[in-house]
Amino acid sequence: MPQIKVRGIALEQLCGGSKELIDELVKVVGCPRDYFELEYIESVAIRDGLIENAYPFIEVAWFDRGLEVQDKVADIITRFAHKIGVQNLDIAFVCFEGRKYYENGKHFG
C-alpha cells in the first residue's frame, strides 16, 4: 500500500516512466503491484507574492520496511527522477502505525 505522492514534476514527465518505476519498486518492497498508488498533486509555489513552479518533492507514505529498503526505494525514485529530466528533488518517508491506520473501519494493529 505504498502511496507515492508527487509535487513539482510535470504530469507528462511523471507518466513517462511510471510503469518502470513501479516495476522496480515491486521487486524491492515485496508487495503486489496493485498495492502501489502513484499520485500526481498539482501545486504552485508562492514566494514573495509571485507564483513559481513548486520544487520537486516526493512523499512516500507506507508501513515501515526498515532503513535498508527505504534507502533502496529512495535510490530508485532518484534515478527515475533523473531519467525523466528532474535533477534535484527531495524525498520524504512517512510511516503509518498499524493501530492508527484503518481500512474499512478496521485498524491494522
Image (cartoon, rainbow, N blue to C red):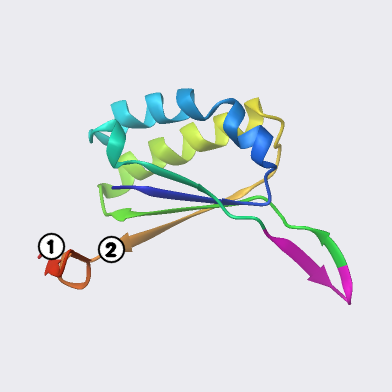
Residue 53 located left or right of residue 94: right
Q: Which residue is mark 1?
A: 108
Placement of 75 over or under 105, stated as above or below = above
Task: Name the disc covering residue 80, or none.
Answer: none
**Residue 22 image point, x, y percent:** 41, 30
Q: Secondary structure at mark 1?
A: loop
As drawn, the residue found furthest toward the bottom would be 49
Q: Label 2: how many residues lie within 10 Å, few (<14), some (14-19) or many (20+)?
A: few
The residue positioned 38% from the left and 24% from the top of the image is 23
The answer to the question of whether label 2 and label 1 lie on touching residues, with beta carbons closer than 8 A, is yes
User: Is 47 in the magenta?
Assistant: yes
**Cα separation between marks 2 and 1:** 10 Å
Above or below — where is 51 with respect to 92? below
Residue drawn where x is 56% and y is 30% of the image: 80
Q: Residue at x 26, y 54 (%)?
A: 64
User: Which residues lie in the magenta part?
Assistant: 43-50
Quarter occupied by the C terminus:
bottom left
Q: Position of residue 49 (x, y in %)?
A: 89, 76
Left or right of residue 16, residue 32 in this image: left
- The mark nearer the N terminus, 2 or 1, is 2
Within-10-Å neighbours for mark 1: few <14, some 14–19, many 20+: few
- The image position of residue 51, as x and y in percent, is 85, 65
- Quarter location, residue 81: top right
Label disc, if present, on residue 96 of the rendered structure: 2
Total numbered circles: 2
